[in-house]
Amino acid sequence: MKKKQFTQILGFSLLRTCACAVILVLAVILYDIASKGAVVINWKFLTTMPADGMTKGGILPAIIGTFLVTVITAILAIPLGMGCAIYMNEYAKDGLITRFIRMAIRNLSGVPSIVYGLFGVILFVQLMNIGTCILAAGFTLGLMTLPWTITASEEALKNVPNSYREGSLALGATKWQTIKTNVLPYAVSGMLTGTILGLSRAAGETAPILFTGAAFYLPHLPKSLFDQFMALPYHLYIMSTQHHSISKVRPIAYGTALVLIALVFTMNLFAVILRYKLRKVKME
Amino acid sequence: MDSPKIMVRNFNFYYGASKALKNINIDIPENRVTGIIGPSGCGKSTFLRSLNRMNDVIVNARAEGRVVLDGRNIYDEDVDVVDIRRKVGMVFQKSNPFPKSIFENVAYGLKINGVKDKYYINETIEKSLRDAAIWEEVKDRLHKSAFELSGGQQQRICIARALAVQPEVLLMDEPASALDPTATLKIEELIQALKKKYTIVIVTHNMQQAARISDFTAFFMLGELVEYNLTGIMFTKPSKKITEDYITGRFG
């Protein structure tokens, strides 16, 4: 009996240590970045252009660039991903084609992001000839986000009880009416949550935008979606590895990292709030 | 027998390679309650779901033969399944209200069928809820969630929801199996009242229930229709030994 209790306590402690380790990692990263980044962050840092060979000034163009690219990513990934998920979960019968699509989605999520970057260059920049620009980078990130969007959306659709579908069909609703009025309203919060989480991951990616539109330095803000842009993750990469005096710009790198992390956290928080709100609406 | 509302002829149903219904022939009379009894897995639910083609949604399932509703085979290629389901309503075993208000639940069928007239919708909802014997209990909270109701009330909301689209036939798949005796009694009384306006086909596990509420009873076993007759005859002088064995509880 004693031994049994001891094993129980030991196992419990071990498991708890594992869980706490995760928090510890996050805490250390956050503390490191926040403590070193917070000193440079002020209104001016967020709202001015870089100056003096990027050793001074702010990161405004990187913030705007990341924002615009994420919007393009969303415009591509949300309708395409949700549409695909609805087809897969509601319409597609289990067959060779369906299995093939599923396999494709699974494999797409395993493709390294740099390969997406290369693909983006070939498809958008060269073949479609839209050049290295916000649009090309956004599309590339959109493609990369698709598997996550589709998987999360399908999961959300699966969570809608089948009895809602049957009940609606039995009343003489068409399949599309059923999906529109009695499935999607209860799945959309989960679909959007998953999508936003995907977008927040895309916003932090460097490799896919590296060849498709992100610039080392631009003296002005992008004027259209066909312009090159600066982006937070790429800016961070430059400041940490490519700049001519890395040690001098280290504070700026930390500031950039902090802004990027804050952006990603904000998006995740937004996803959580959205899910909560929509769930409340659903229950009423 | 009165004029049949539904005539089933040489009907077979397959799930993949397994045959769930074997050469079913049955006439279901208008404005009567027809009870379907039989042991679990005998095909009674499959049969019920064949009458409004709810089995269409099952992958790899296949129907053969005819189900003639008002002189028209509902499995003909040019028949719109949506029309069939509006004419042949269904109440499920587990009450399945939608996560909407009581009002929205009952209005659902009207809205998807393109009814916009607010006055008509309000009238129909009240009438359907009255017909489903639940109006008095919910009239003051029509805009509250249907999930707040008890199981028996939820099932009556589902019946009201089916009635709102004014079907001619009502299929019920063990509608009281998850309810307590009081709620069951209410549903049974309701079925008696509803048969004046509707043709009702009800699957039930409960032999006493079939004896109490149905005018005709069909006994299914292993996918076959074993015997079908007036309920009074079925429960007193069944012509087949196996029917008698089942009804007297020797197996099942």
Image (cartoon, helix red, strand yellow):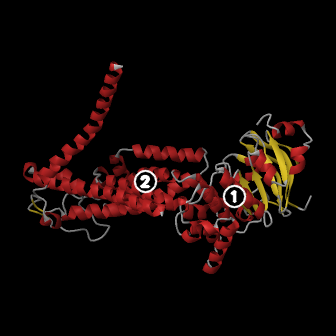
> Which residue corresponds to the image point at 80% horizontal and 52% vertical from the top-left?
B212
What amino acid type should be assigned to the residue bearing mark 2? Thr
- Let me know if marks 2 and 1 both belong to one chain: no
* Tally of marks: 2
Name the secondary structure under disc 2: helix
Residue extending furthest toward the front = B182
Name the secondary structure under disc 1: helix
Residue B64 makes an appearance in the image: no
| Residue B140 horizontal side relative to residue B167, left or right | left
As drawn, the label of residue A238 is none
Quadrant where the image shows the N terminus of chain B: bottom right
> Which residue corresponds to the image point at 79% horizontal and 37% vertical from the top-left?
B249
Residue B68 makes an appearance in the image: yes
What amino acid type should be assigned to the residue bearing mark 1? Lys
Reading the image, the residue beneath label 1 is B186
Q: In the displayed structure, would residue A173 be above or below residue B176?
A: below
Quadrant where the image shows the C terminus of chain B: top right
**Is A179 in front, or is A76?**
A179
Q: In the displayed structure, would residue A6 be above or below residue A91?
A: above
| Marks 2 & 1, CB-CB < 8 Å contact | no
Reading the image, the residue beneath label 2 is A149
Q: Name the quadrant containing residue B110.
A: bottom right
Distance between mark 2 and mark 1 Cα atoms: 47 Å
Q: Badge 2 sits on which subunit?
A: A
| Residue A155 horizontal side relative to residue B205, left or right | left
**Residue B81 location in percent, x, y?**
72, 61
